[in-house]
Amino acid sequence: MPVQVVDLFCGVGGLTRGLLDAELDVIAGFDIDPTCQFTYEYNNHVDYHLRNIRDVNGDEINALYDQDAVKILVGCAPCQPFSQMRFKLRDANERDEKYDLLLEFGRLIEEVQPTIISMENVPKIRETDVYNTFLEILSRNGYHVSSQVVYCPNYGIPQTRRRFVLVASLLGQINIVPPTHNPQDVHVRDFIENLPELAAGAVDPDDPMHRSAALTDRNLRRIRASVPGGTWRDWPENLRCACHRRDSGQTYSSVYGRMTWEQIGPTITTQFFSYGTGRYGHPEQDRALSLREGALLQTFPRNYNFINPEQPFIFGDIARHIGNAVPVRLGEIIGISIINHLHENDIEI
C-alpha cells in the first residue's frame, strides 16, 4: 500500500524536503508563486503545480494519488496575517486576502478525505476564528487532532523560532515525536562557521548563494562597534539611531545586533540579510548574514539551489523564499511523526 503526500502552499520546498528526508513519498506541491517553481522542482524532483489554491478541487488532488494509496495532505497557509507584529491589527488582517486560506485547506480536506493531515503556522493563529472553523471541519470529518507549539531548538534547529504544528489522523491518536535535542547543544557555529569569509556586499565565487548585502559607511562603523550578543547600546553615542534615543525605541535591543557562535540564532525572517532588522550580524565578520547562511540556519542542505539560471537574480526574492520556508528539520520531524503513527497502525512505508 503506497503512502503518498501532497504539499499545499509548498513554496521552495522546506516542508517537502524534510518529508523526503524522513523517507515519505511527496508526489506534488501546489503554490501560487511562479518564482518558487525552479527551486522546488530542481532540488526535490517533485512536480510543482502553479495554482491558486482557491481554484483547486478535491478531484484534482485525488487524481494525483495512486488508487490504493494512504493519502497525506500537508500545508502551511501563509502566516503573515497571524504574525506577532500584525496580530494587533486584527480588523485589517481579516481583510487580508490570505486570511482565510486555512479554510481553503479545510475545504480540500473535506473533499480529498486524506488519512493524515499536517498544518504548520505561527502560534497566534490559534486565537483566530478561521482556526476554530478549521478545527470544526476536522472534528466533523472524524479526525483525531493533536497540536502543540514547537520550540525549534528542541529539534536541532538553531533559531529562537516557535511554530504551531497540528497533526490529525483518521486512524487514531497521532503525536509529534518528543524533543530530539538539548537546546543548550544547538549553536550557530555548527551551521555556518565553515563557510568562506565574506565582506559586506561580496559574493563567494564558488557559491553564488553565499553573498551578503552591502552596508553603508555608517552601518559598517556600527557593526565594527558591535559585539556578539550585544546591542546598539555598545556603540558610541554618535552612531546611535535617533529612534533609539527615544523612550519608544529603548526596547528594540536586538536590531543591529551580532549573533553569538555558541548560542541559538534569531528567527530567520524574510529580512534576515539586513543588519538593521534584527540580530542578523555575523558573529565575527563585519556584515549581515549571507543568503546561504540564512538557508543553513533554516536547515536547508548546503547544496540546495535557489538560483534559476534562466531568470535574473533577485536578491530579495531568494531571501523571501528562505524566510517564508518551513525549516527543513521541522518538516523531517513532522514526517517522522507520521511514519511512527503509520507503523503503530501496521502500515509500512
Image (cartoon, rainbow, N blue to C red):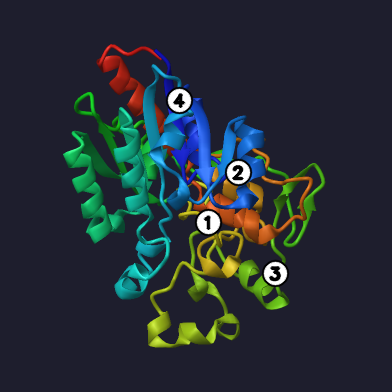
Which of disc 4 and disc 3 is earlier in sequence?
4
The kind of residue on which mark 4 rests is Tyr
Which of disc 2 and disc 3 is earlier in sequence?
2
Q: Answer with left or right where residue 230 lies relative to residue 132.
A: right
Residue nearest the viewer, comparing 70 with 347 = 70
Quickly name the residue at label 2: 192
The kind of residue on which mark 3 rests is Leu
Q: Quadrant of the C terminus?
A: top left
**What distance separates the C-alpha of mark 1 from that of mark 3?**
17 Å
User: What is the secondary structure assignment of the residue under circle 2?
Assistant: helix
Residue at the image point whose x is 47% and y is 46% from the top: 9
Compared with residue 158, is residue 335 higher up or lower down, i.e. above or below?
above
Looking at the rendered image, the disc whose residue lies closer to the viewer, 1 or 4, is 4
- Around disc 4, counting alpha carbons within 10 Å, would you say few (fewer than 14), some (14 to 19), or many (20 or more)? some
Residue at the image point whose x is 47% and y is 82% from the top: 244
**What distance separates the C-alpha of mark 2 from that of mark 4?**
39 Å
Which of disc 4 and disc 1 is earlier in sequence?
4
Residue 296 in the image: x percent, y percent? 58, 43
Quickly name the residue at label 4: 65
- Around disc 2, counting alpha carbons within 10 Å, would you say few (fewer than 14), some (14 to 19), or many (20 or more)? many
**What distance separates the C-alpha of mark 1 from that of mark 4?**
45 Å
Quickly name the residue at label 3: 215
Outermost residue on the right side: it is 205
Residue at the image point whose x is 48% and y is 51% from the top: 265
**What distance separates the C-alpha of mark 3 from that of mark 4?**
49 Å
The kind of residue on which mark 1 rests is Met
Quickly name the residue at label 1: 259
Looking at the rendered image, the disc whose residue lies closer to the viewer, 1 or 3, is 3
Residue nearest the viewer, comparing 261 with 130 = 130
Q: Are marks 1 and 4 in contact (CB under 8 Å)?
A: no
